[in-house]
Amino acid sequence: MRIILQNLTKTFPSRNKKSNEEVVAVKDLDFEIPDGKLIGLLGPSGCGKSTTLYMICGLQKPTSGRIFFGDNDVTSLEPEHRGVGLVFQNYALYPHLTVKQNILFPLQNLKGADKLTKEEMLDRAQKAADLVQIGELMDRKPSELSGGQQQRVAIARALVKTPRVLLLDEPLSNLDARLRLQTREEIKRIQRETKVTTVFVTHDQEEAMSISDMIVVMKEGVVQQIGQPQNVYDDPDNLFVAQFLGTPPINTFDGVVAGGTLFIGDDAVLDVPASVPDGPVSVGIRPEGFIPDENGRFSGKLVNIEVMGRDCSVVFTNDSSRKPNVRAIVDSDIQIIRGADNTVRFDLKKNKVFIFNAETGERIRFDDSDKSVRV
Amino acid sequence: MNNAVTIKKQKKPKAVKDNFESSSNFKAWLYLSPALILLIIFSFYPLINTFRMAFLNGYNGLAIVGGEKFTIGIENFKTVINYVDFKLCLKNTLLLCVVTVPISTTLALLIAVALNSIKPLQKFLQTVFFLPYVTNSIAIGMVFNAMFTRVGLGDLIQTQGIINNIIGIFGIEPINFVNVGSSWGANMFVVCTYIIWNAIPFKILVLLGGLQNVNKQYYEAAKIDGTSKIRTFFRITIPLVSPMLAYVIITSFIGGFKEYSSIVGIFGDGMGPGSNGQMNTLVGYVYNMLPKSNSGNASAASLILFGIILIVTAINGYVSKKKVHY
Amino acid sequence: MAEFNNAVKEVNVESVKASQRTSKIIRYTITYLFLGIMAIIVIFPFYWMIISSFKTMDEYRANVPTLWPQNFVFENFTTAFSKANLLDLFKHTLYVGLVSTVLSLIVTILSAFAFARLNFKGKNLVFGLLMATMMVPGELYTITNYLTVSGRLPFISEPVEAFDITNTFAVLIFPMLVSVFYIYLLRQTFMQIPNELYLAAKVDGTSDFKYLWKVMLPLSVSTIITITILKMMGAWNAYIWPRLVANDAAHQLITNGLRGASFTDEFGETNYPAQMAAVTIVSIPLFLVFVFLRKYIMRGVSRSGIKG
């Protein structure tokens, strides 16, 4: 089921009773979720991603704008008529019912022509449970399950009624680190097997990048960028997106463009086309964008080298950096050559360097050719 | 003192606590003594004495009269159980429990759920429903009497009472609810009405508290699954507030078995129209025995009451263990 | 797993929307109607009590009842005061209420402190015994207590005059002084105060008593207020015990006085407006407590299930 969000806006009355200002949770959302894909809504907390999810499932009504499921306008439709399955952040499993009863619950609601016989219900519940691999836990109560198992039950309960859309609210946030890795693969697998259009919300960029077919990066209720994870990572539209995606995070610098050259401090680090206007800019360089080279154009003072097996992380300072330290990830085979006063020098990979408008943070694209580098 | 602490502390870490313990043993009993002395005189001794008196045949509150000794036995219990009044009291008490507990619990649950589902006027209505919570049951019992009573006799009846006036609107003939000559059934109706009215606020308070503590996401999950309101109520709401329901039911059963002052409020301590005692309860029976120096019978009756309460509590506990979900 | 793939049929959006709206309207109408009717039923006795207290006898007895007094008569209240002797009853009740509250607080605070903060041999046993008494209905105690206060002691064949304290204020105060529930309530509050505070005070050489007075009580004010209100209301609503042991004119408490007062006039007819005025007067303090101090009562009562 294709989902179309059209100029979706949601405002809440201000919490401060004295001011009449409204809080804008989501502003002018306008995008399309293709059928059968896994989409991650990504952003820091309070960016409106959960509100968006709740509007898609119908628990919250948009202040303005429209929502389409396929060709149907479902904007004012109650949740039960939308055919969505929602997995809550804390799973919301009914504590007094067993796993089986929890999964059967949505099926027992079906009325009229949709009504199932007892055998059909049990059969479907068992299939859903098997799909999420909890088939043998059917008679337990939720309190007797681990966090990961509860998560699976919640997904089974959402899937058992064959929803048109599966929605997951921060599905991994209540799990410990090890389970998180395992569960996100699991979600991907389940989505692939069922081919149900799935939207999930997360503040963890790694999580979103690793399993989504498409990510929607949001900030303060406004969509920043939409695209395949790798594309968004390689070609961010603005400084926020560049900073939000990637571990370790992108290094940011104050730079100046003058006469076709990008300067960071006194170093003329990169040649840029004349189309880039002269003036101060923000520069983002991915940690993997540094190539150690004793004659390199970019310099810094070495602080520390952290070896992490295959890679090593070179930590150095640079006067124009916005953070105290700059971090470069390089192959651990490469010899780092220290100059006088611990100076280290690098060359930069052009496609890992992004220039942004110093005030608005908008990307200033300077080399169309590197789009071809994309995977 | 400080010295002692530091020295002992070096020996073992637990020493701080130990040191206080030894010095506070005496102090603790000193602090407890006023409460303990009063409790021994007015609670522990009476508890034992009640058992003693109940099993002394025909005991009248004095140890020995004219050198005669009381024999030990269950005569008092036999007397009490065979007493016509006792049977009436037991019947009244059981009936008003069986009638009022389910009705007031159901009404309170419905009101609490309704209150929980609305936004405008919620706070106002909440206050209204809690209003009978803090009342003097004798005083308001007198108001109920006034509402149900008719003034005047025979042809000279001046007003049938406001309740008769109201049911008259629906074409029902005036009923003699509480005046002299009124029937047992009519009296029971008034008593039950009053007890239900009086019991509802506490139950709403507890149940509403329970409802407000239920995680909203259960309802959102149910809504997304298209669960009907009725099914949500029976399959989600009731199980999730079942601990509060059990609590309310147990306390109101116990309260029902100890019912006395509501009836005094309506009928006076004659416990019935014209003091005929037809509305008397178990507790009323115990108190009637007292001034008549029937301590043995009164003790036996109160132990029977205690026994009934224990049984009801045990049954409730057993049922809720099976039905209350967590 | 094809069966999970979008097998849902399309819905007719417009008709669903319309039925959604009507069912919502119906639901809200029923909810408010139900709450409204129940609210009227709950309020009505209070309403009837108050308006009746302002009516004349003739209007009260009118064949067709009036829902609003034709003209307000305040004379019922003065009648109530004189017929039920309300002023004396107020005084007695206030005296018993205040004295028993103060004494009860002292006893409760001392015991709660011992249970919450001191370690002594047999603490759990004594506390368990006390808790067990909460299960026992008061009627079991009343029988023996009635004998005790009227001087009929065990193993003595004649009533002892010297121990007969019926018809005194003391008999209204002491037998009911200790409430295990209040001790439990205050102990719970005390236990929430971190133990480190006590140890710190001990290291500084603060005496137990000073610590109790300067640290624990100020931190437990709201529970103390709860106990005070419940105790005062106890005196105000007490009926059974006072009727048994101190029902004479010099010691009668308000509820007994109200129930026992005769509002019958010289023709043998009950003066209902005056009676309702008396009931109103007795109810007003409770009403004020409810309006202003509700949260303190609810704190205590919802834990005990004992009605105020």
Image (spheres, coloured by chain):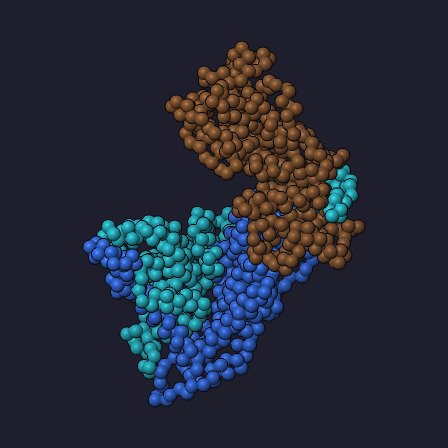
Chain colours: A brown, B blue, C cyan
Residue A236 place in picture, x, y as percent: 59, 26
Q: How many marks?
A: 0
The C terminus of chain A appears in which quarter of the rendering? Answer: top right
Residue placed most toward the observer, B323 or C44? B323
Residue A153 place in picture, x, y as percent: 63, 51
Residue A52 place in picture, x, y as percent: 62, 35
Left or right, A64 with respect to A44, comes to: right
Q: Is residue B178 above or below residue A214?
A: below
Residue placed most toward the observer, B234 or C308? B234
| Image quadrant where residue A276 sits | top right
Spot the residue most to the bottom.
Answer: B67
Residue placed most toward the observer, C255 or B316? B316
Residue located 64% across and 19% down the image: A368
Residue placed most toward the observer, A33 or C212? A33
Residue located 50% across and 33% down the image: A332
The N terminus of chain A appears in which quarter of the rendering? Answer: top right
Left or right, B77 with respect to C124, comes to: right
Residue located 24% across and 56% down the image: B10
Q: Is residue C190 above or below residue B281?
A: above
- Residue B233 appears in the rendering: no
Spot the residue most to the right.
Answer: A113
Residue A123 place in picture, x, y as percent: 73, 56
Left or right, C206 with respect to A339, comes to: left
- Residue C128 appears in the rendering: yes
Residue located 59% across and 69% down the image: B95
